[in-house]
Image (cartoon, rainbow, N blue to C red):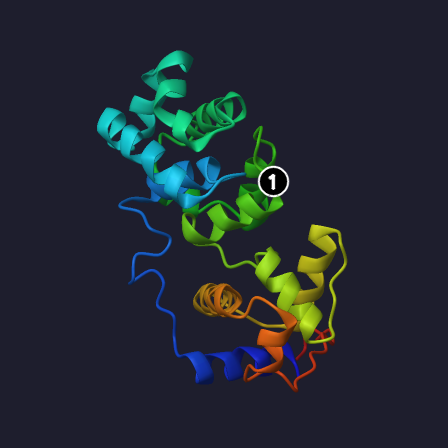
Amino acid sequence: MTIETLYQQMLAAMGPRHWLQAGIPPAETPWEILWGGILVQNTNWRNVDYALANLKAATDFEPRRLLALTDTELTTLVKPAGFYTRKVPTLKALAAWCGQYDFDLTVMRALPAEQLRRELIALRGIGDETADYFSMYVFHQPTIIIDTYLRRLFGWLNQPLPSNYLKAQQLIMQAWHYDLTTAWELHALIVDFGKQVKTTADFERSFLATQRLTLASQSLAN
């Protein structure tokens, strides 16, 4: 099967996920998605929820108000999420970067996708997966997020991916024509599938059990 066939089969079997309409990622504003995406690193959402509740009370998630906090004040707020010595500088660096664009999401969303990703990656504490998560769910740039759920599913489908993040991502990008809506939907389908199908035995009982995936590159002419 091609990745388009995989997408269509998952969509038919599971139905549209409608993550954004359902409030997934769980957030009141795009700023909360940004702060939550940093805080969730190396921890779970329960701990993040405590930290976000503190941030909301202190700043209403406004980046200007976050930047006005001292490191000590911010550390106290986000301490429930752990690893605060790493996360506090990243939160401030991300907020300061947004400040370069006057905290205007419309301006940031208009940036070329490659420039946006390059500038996010340049910030301390933001790696490939987090940058792509922000690109898609905050800045509305279609992309492919290479996470554990995707790698595990592709392995079961006999299409293991390169260990290098960008090489794996490029392989999929070359094999599938997608827009923001389909990129959102595929990611949601794979994550929701992965939360239910956790073992090889689970997979062998799933609707994809007999399938095999081939990522054949498509030319631009196609």
Q: Which residue: 65% across, 72% down?
A: 200
Q: Crowding near pointer 1: few (<14 within 10 Å), some, many (20+)?
A: few
In the rendered image, is residue 107 in sight?
Answer: no
Q: Position of residue 122 (x, y in %)?
A: 61, 32
Give the amino acid type for the residue marked by disc 1 in the picture.
Gly
Q: Where is residue 42 in the image (x, y as percent from the top left)?
A: 54, 38
Left or right of 141 on screen, residue 69 = left
Quadrant where the C terminus sits is bottom right
Quadrant where the N terminus sits is bottom right
Q: Which residue: 43% across, 32% down?
A: 81
The quarter holding residue 2 reads bottom right
Of residues 101 and 216, which is closer to you in this image? Answer: 216
In the rendered image, is residue 188 in sight?
Answer: yes
Q: Which residue: 35% across, 56% down?
A: 24
Say above or below: 140 vs 204.
above
**Is disc 1 placed on a helix, strand or loop?**
loop
Q: Where is residue 89 in the image (x, y as percent from the top left)?
A: 50, 22
Say above or below: 185 vs 127.
below
Q: Where is residue 106 in the image (x, y as percent from the top left)?
A: 35, 44
Of residues 194 and 174, which is closer to you in this image? Answer: 194
Mark 1 = which residue? 127
